[in-house]
Image (cartoon, rainbow, N blue to C red):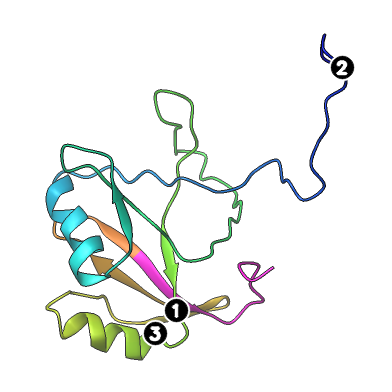
Amino acid sequence: MSKGGSWIRPYNRRMINAAHVLLFSANPAADRAFFLDTLQLPHVDVGHGWLIFKLPPSEVAVHPIDPDTTAAADGTMPASLYLMCEDVGETIARLQAQHVTCSPVKTEQWGKVTLVSLPSGAKIGLYEPTHPTAHGL
């Protein structure tokens, strides 16, 4: 209870209303251009060329960590970005038409996966899930 009365929590308000993913890049300008021009993600410009991109509906999965992996200096856990699609072969063809390099598709228990090379040389995952997804809940 606050000094002025009781706290009222709106019925439909969730504790968490979004996620903000941080990607660390050796060439942020080039990788931002990839998200802007190649993936054509909507964005806001917060100034000085700093773009924040809207992502499609998302989900998070917590996996066990390799004992040799260490957390970041600030204690945050390591993370990987995997974008999801309905047809990985079709999506790869569209990316390759824009001169984007993708690794050969591997079939895993959880889906068909490729790695997409960003202009900086870093890679992000892209996969067609075969497991139930949570992003539409």
Query: Which residue in the structure is indicated by mark 1?
Result: 85
Is disc 3 in contact with disc 1, using a CB cutoff of under 8 Å?
yes
Using the rendered view, name the quadrant where residue 25 is placed.
top left
Residue 120 visible in image? no
In the image, taking residue 2 as reference, residue 135 lies left or right, namely: left
Residue 99's place in the image compared with 65, above or below, is below
Task: Identify the residue shown where x is 38% and y is 71%.
Answer: 126
Residue lying farthest to the top in this orientation: 3
Query: Which residue in the structure is indicated by mark 2?
Result: 5
Can you give x and y, in whole percent of width and height, for residue 31 in the image? 19, 55
Q: Which residues are magenta?
A: 125-137
Tell me the amino acid under the disc marked 2: Gly
Residue 131: in magenta span: yes
Can you give x and y, in whole percent of width and height, for residue 50 in the image? 22, 42
Task: Identify the residue shown where x is 29% and y is 83%.
Answer: 92
Can you give x and y, in whole percent of width and height, for residue 134 in the image? 65, 67
Residue 88 image label:
3
